[in-house]
Amino acid sequence: MADNLDWKPLRSSNVARAAYDSEAGELLVEFVSGATYAYQNQSESSLDDLVNSSSPGSWVARWLKPLPARRIS
């Protein structure tokens, strides 16, 4: 994971912030609990969709939860 990621804060009771790692092609999502997950094979537009969604938590549940992810913290 690149150290210089541009994390976007989110207004959500479940999702704290998200970033896109262009080198790895991963969407990183940090939850309010402090857990951070990396979702592979994502495009930068996924970050835009998440940031611009009316409900980031619902967006994550619908589009990311079904996908394999690795916990990074």
Image (cartoon, helix red, strand yellow):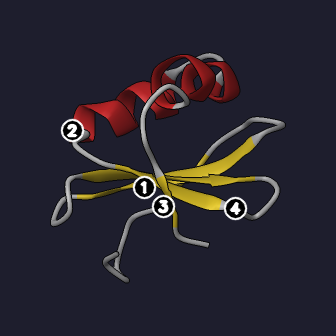
* Labels 2, 4: front one: 4
The span from disc 2 to disc 3 (Cα, nearest Å) is 15 Å
Give me the residue at 49% from left, 34% from top: 51
Q: Are marks 2 and 1 in contact (CB under 8 Å)?
A: no
Mark closer to the chain start, 2 or 3: 3
Residue highlighted by disc 4 = 35
Amino acid type, callout 4: Ala
Amino acid type, callout 3: Trp
Residue highlighted by disc 2 = 43
Nearest the eye: 35 or 16: 35
Q: Position of residue 46 (x, y in %)?
A: 33, 32
Secondary element at tag 1: strand
The span from disc 1 to disc 3 (Cα, nearest Å) is 5 Å
Q: Quadrant of the C terminus?
A: bottom right
42 lies left or right of 7: left
Amino acid type, callout 2: Ser
Q: Position of residue 59 (x, y in %)?
A: 56, 21
The span from disc 2 to disc 4 (Cα, nearest Å) is 21 Å
* Labels 2, 3: front one: 2
